[in-house]
Amino acid sequence: MTRLKTRIAELIDATGPIPVSEYMALCLFDPEDGYYTTREPFGAAGDFVTAPEISQMFGELVAIWLYEAWRATGRPLPVIIAEIGPGRGTLMKDMLRTLSRLDTALTAGASFAMIETSPRLTGIQRQTLAGTSATIRWHEAIDTLPRTPLLIVGNELFDAVPIRQFVHAGTGWRERMIGLDDTGGLRFFAGAGSVDPTLLPDDAEEAPQGAIAEIAPARTALMATISERLARLGGAGLFLDYGHLQPGIGDTLQALRKHDHEDVLANPGEADLTAHVDFAALAAIVRAHGLDAHLATQGEFLVRMGLLERAGRLGANASEAAREKIAGEVERLAGPQAMGELFKVLAVLPTGIAVPPFPATD
């Protein structure tokens, strides 16, 4: 039993069952034993590999989109270019290299920020970015960024923000809780209180007994903070994550450890806990703040941004083995059986502004 699992069991024994959202927050962000505060989860030696770690092409194309968004919004200077939830810093490193080649006036006039809550990951990011010429500042929240226009990117950000789950039990829906079984182990069960059905997806009424529905108020709150900032001070945002474009019923909570799935309750603090992102809910928040929200699959976005052309240039004078490696990276990033369909993209722009591959809205 992990140390955090023991502490969670003691907490439940003392105060009663806890909701999934609290369990998820403890597992990921507990200051002493949380997953993101105690380990480096990224890469082949960790538990999962993110798109920036797969290929430099991902960061290059994201940087090109941010550059085009900056141009389309009037080339504001000063401007902040920020990454929220920046992992090891690989994406920012690739973006800085690309932006410096695109426009030295932008990189000279912009300030760069990393929004990170984990001291451990902040240290790793500083190491990754140590060789860059840009001045980068670290922040724990968006609120402390300078009050200027903002270009912000988040890759695999929202999937780790805690969710609430509800189970269809009896005549209604009840919050899914985590309590103790007869042996003192962790287990799921339906809580006592019923939930307002208007919070749930439209098809919840027809769902069978035992069905799971998910909502994510912490995610929508974070999206609201970002949207309010962009609406007030200007800028644009790009967010890439795995999830669905339409809300629906289903249990997407999962634990990932050493590149394989395991029981969500098995090893608190030692496995990554995530859940699929409801992009429709995030887009609704964006539009409620008077901004445009554009949605696409990651495969569509990257291909339309020039992934295949960039791969061709990288492979033009490369060896056969290098070309095969590049082709494999393209498939992982954009292939329908890999990240291309499962991962989605949300672009946030001022109303009426077109930034390829997204057209302006009326």
Image (spheres, rainbow, N blue to C red):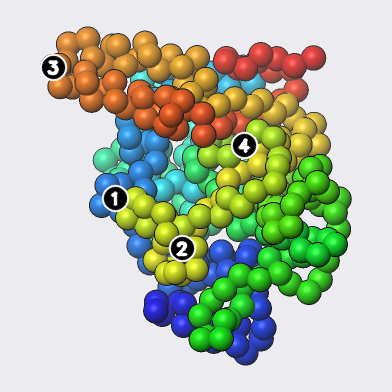
Residue pictured at 86% horizontal, 58% vertical: 196
Type of residue at label 1?
A: Gln
Type of residue at label 2?
A: Asp
Type of residue at label 4?
A: His
Q: Earlier in the sequence, mark 3 or mark 4?
A: 4
Q: Is residue 87 left or right of residue 182?
A: left
Q: Quadrant of residue 17?
A: bottom right
Check if mark 4's residue and mark 2's residue have beta carbons within 8 Å.
no
Q: Is residue 241 visible?
A: yes
Residue highlighted by disc 2: 263
Residue highlighted by disc 1: 127
Q: Earlier in the sequence, mark 2 or mark 1?
A: 1
Mark 3–mark 1 distance (CA, rounded to whole Å): 31 Å
Tell me the mark number nearer the camera, choosing from 3 and 4. Answer: 4
Check if mark 2's residue and mark 1's residue have beta carbons within 8 Å.
no
Q: Quadrant of the C terminus?
A: top right
Q: Few, some or many C-alpha atoms within 10 Å of disc 1 (few <14, some 14-19, many ≥20)?
A: few
Q: Is residue 276 left or right of residue 7?
A: right
Pick out the residue farthest to the bottom: 14
Type of residue at label 3?
A: Ser
Residue highlighted by disc 4: 244
| SS at badge 1 | helix
The residue nearer to you, when weighing 160 against 262, is 262
The residue nearer to you, when weighing 163 against 107, is 163
Residue pictured at 86% horizontal, 50% vertical: 198
Check if mark 3's residue and mark 2's residue have beta carbons within 8 Å.
no
Q: Count every numbered label the image shows and give the total.
A: 4
